[in-house]
Amino acid sequence: MTSDEIVRKYREFIYPLLTYYREPLPITSGQGCLVSDAEGREYLDFFGGILTVSVGHCLEAITAKIAVQLGKLQHISTLYPTAPAADLAEMLSRITPGGLRKSFFTNSGTEADEMAVLTAQIHTGSTDVIALRHSYSGRSAMAMSLTGHAYWKASKVLLPGIHHAHAPYCYRCPFRLEYPSCDLACARDIEELVRTETGGRVAAMIAEPILGVGGFIVPPREYFQVAAAIVRRYGGLFIADEVQTGWGRTGGKWFGIEQFDLVPDIMTSAKGMANGIPIGWTTTTPEVADSFKGATISTFGGNPVSCAAAIATLQFIEEHRLLAHVESMGAAFRSGLLELREEFASIGDVRGMGLMLAMEIVKDRKGKVPDPETVLRIFEETRKEGLLIGKGGLYGNVIRLSPPMTVTMSQVKTGLKMLRAALGRAIGKKE
């Protein structure tokens, strides 16, 4: 089919979906860091299916192992143990921090977060949950209630007992302070939140180590230590939502929360865990996991094909030493983005970690006025260049960049060159 035919069928037969660009861009194939459209034009993919194609499109080292499992057993449900689920759980217990050892598999990050919150509520006997403003947890009723971003709350009926703390958004500090003289006011305010909006005890705080859809907001290094200590003091567990930050994406370590020297009580992930094959994952300590009472299954959770894909992905990351590779490629990429900031006055902030980087686009640096219109122009120009990027932020003014973790130095340089050309046409005036 041509691109026009694909788009026509989407509009006629599929629910309305959010797509990028003035005219949607159908993608029909991919290899490594490259994808192609229906007309055969190649694009350098610097968004990776929202940080989901973690190590590259259609890599033979991974797809071959998926095919073997697909020919052996494709589904049986959690009512029957399978070797891929058992092997994956064992492998995960080896790389997770602290005493996180027992896993529960689902289909998506939404389900993983739901399971984490439910586990915390059962274990603590409390129901109140703290989430962050600017956060994103998914599209179920609970996940939308946890999400601190009105744009993504399609449901008008939100669950009670969820309280949103200030985000550690240093570029737009809600207290109008500056780090480090702020003394982490955003984290310390959680105590007053607990004492004024709850009954004095909480089940959990759930937080992304780096707020993804919120615009790759990176907290100060000490933030989570302070926040988790407060939550634990009031009886709660700390849940690290690693749906976007996991599997080496932040560089040097398997999980984003490890960059902040904190061991969570529960951790979730999905997306890049199986390089694009659907999977969700919740892990916790044996003590917390064993407190979960009552019948529960997950029809597609622990699917043998998904688990085989996850095992193959994690093995690939280890064998190719991608944790270190992400660190070095991320440093080079960030350096290039900082150079662009010096060149273009519309880039107000460059932030991120590893290969999870962002540029916040503003109308003027002093006032930091969000400029989502310019972001839309940049998108159209990067499409012309053959570069796929992402966006986010509460105001829609943040460009998100997250290429597959196998990206090469040559591709980083090419991506920066494309971005510079697109910015030049979209913004025009240089500083």
Image (cartoon, rainbow, N blue to C red):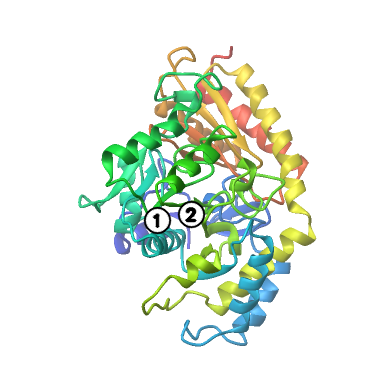
Q: Nearer the viewer, residue 265 or 45?
A: 265
| Element carrying mark 1 | helix
- Within the image, what quadrant is residue 298 found in? bottom left
Horizontal placement of 42 versus 209: left or right?
Answer: right
Under mark 2, the amino acid is Pro
Location of mark 2 (residue): 26
Under mark 1, the amino acid is Val
Tell me residue 214's x, y (percent).
44, 39
- Among numbered discs 2 and 1, the one appearing first in the sequence: 1
Q: Nearer the viewer, residue 46 or 117?
A: 117
Horizontal placement of 429 versus 142: left or right?
Answer: right
Tell me residue 33's x, y (percent).
66, 51
Q: Are marks 2 and 1 in contact (CB under 8 Å)?
A: yes
Location of mark 1 (residue): 7
Q: Is residue 254 above or below residue 79?
A: above
Q: Residue at x 44, y 49 (%)?
A: 206
Task: Please give the count of numbered marks on the rendered protein.
Answer: 2
Horizontal placement of 346 versus 197: left or right?
Answer: right
